[in-house]
Image: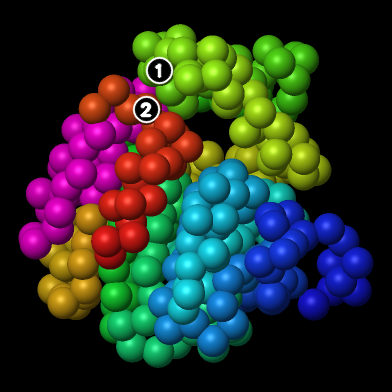
């Protein structure tokens, strides 16, 4: 662990965290001379047999509710980490990332931690994390006990979000505008308007409730470097996992459980891409949440954590 991280605050709940640090990973961008380090935290039971791996584009702090939920359970350990180019992880080489290379980063991290036992891992890949998790299945099929592909797709030209939404996301990431205005823009991308306007039991709108939740992690880490923004967007846009690979994934993972989860109001990755992904993974289960958007984990926390618990 880097000396600076020993004294730095734990990103998630410090009371449940039993290990954190930066794992050295090799560069897989052609030349193996650009090593980078990935920041990670492990929460829960150090001797757990149930190991959960959480992956997405945002910094690991965005998993706060899921980490809190699972780390409080007996025999559960939860690994949350910053993928290359975000949070406390390094960018590495200044060139487009590929999801296949990012999956190798994760394999290096799992090897570093000694998480290499057969049928021991429950993988949760959200959005870009779900894309790279497809290639992680190719690399370590025997280690996986279950995998959930959340609000994601298998790639292709029609998976590219509308340019206007990409431009809005870039303004948010680059911190253009006030904090409140950027959050409002982000909410419009991640959630249906009908959900944002709902009233809660304490007479607040869901939008107001989300302000409180996002304050626990949004903008708490340093701004993303341009190389990281460029690299991650390229990885998402260029992602493609072929039909042949997906069929092999389903075969090699058996008897592991495969679940594809989406919201029917996702504005960023069309819900039909989740239907397509499930159809190309024979034996997979499809969960489609009604009136739910792209950031399903926070909108349907109780429902989704219950569903994930069943894995």
Q: Is residue 271 magenta?
A: yes
Secondary structure type for disc 2: loop
Is residue 162 in sight in this rendering? no
Magenta residue span = 260-289
Mark 2 in CB contact with mark 1 (< 8 angstroms): yes
> In which quadrant of the rendered view does residue 170 lie?
top right
Q: Quickly name the residue at label 2.
A: 293
Picture coordinates of residue 155, whole percent (x, y): 30, 44
For the point 34% across and 32% down, the residue is 269
Q: Camera-side residue: 236 or 291?
A: 291
> In which quadrant of the rendered view does residue 245 lie?
bottom left
Picture coordinates of residue 285, whole percent (x, y): 15, 54
Q: Is residue 306 above or below residue 143?
A: above
Q: Is residue 123 above or below residue 155?
A: below
What label sits on residue 195 in the rendered view?
1
Secondary structure type for disc 1: helix
Q: Camera-side residue: 70 or 98?
A: 70
Q: Earlier in the sequence, mark 2 or mark 1?
A: 1
């Amino acid at each position: 662990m880097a000396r600076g991280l020993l004294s730095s605050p734990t990103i998630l709940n410090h009371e449940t965290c039993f290990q954190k640090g930066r794992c050295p990973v090799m560069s897989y961008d052609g030349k193996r001379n650009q090593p980078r380090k990935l920041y990670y935290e492990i929460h829960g039971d150090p001797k757990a047999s149930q190991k959960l791996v959480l992956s997405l584009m945002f910094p690991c702090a965005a998993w706060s509710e899921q980490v809190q939920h699972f780390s409080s359970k007996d025999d559960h350990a939860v690994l949350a980490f910053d993928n290359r180019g975000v949070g406390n992880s390094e960018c590495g080489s200044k060139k487009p990332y590929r999801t296949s290379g990012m999956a190798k980063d994760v394999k290096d991290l799992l090897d570093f931690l000694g998480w290499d036992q057969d049928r021991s891992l429950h993988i949760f890949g959200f959005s870009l994390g779900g894309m790279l998790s497809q290639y992680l299945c190719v690399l370590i099929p025997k280690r996986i006990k279950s995998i959930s592909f959340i609000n994601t797709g298998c790639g292709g030209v029609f998976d590219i979000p509308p340019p206007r939404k990409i431009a809005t996301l870039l303004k948010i990431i680059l911190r253009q505008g006030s904090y409140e205005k950027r959050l409002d823009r982000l909410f419009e991308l991640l959630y249906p308007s009908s959900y944002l306007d709902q009233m809660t039991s304490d007479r607040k709108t869901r939008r107001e409730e989300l302000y409180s939740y996002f304050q626990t992690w949004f903008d708490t880490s340093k701004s993303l470097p341009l190389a990281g923004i460029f690299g991650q967007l390229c990885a998402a846009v260029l992602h493609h996992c072929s039909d042949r690979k997906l069929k092999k994934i389903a075969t090699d993972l058996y008897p592991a459980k495969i679940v594809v989860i989406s919201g029917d109001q996702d504005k960023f990755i069309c819900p039909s891409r989740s239907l397509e992904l499930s159809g190309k993974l024979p034996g997979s289960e499809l969960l489609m949440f009604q009136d739910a958007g792209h950031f399903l984990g926070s909108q349907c926390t109780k429902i989704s954590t219950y569903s994930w618990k069943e894995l």
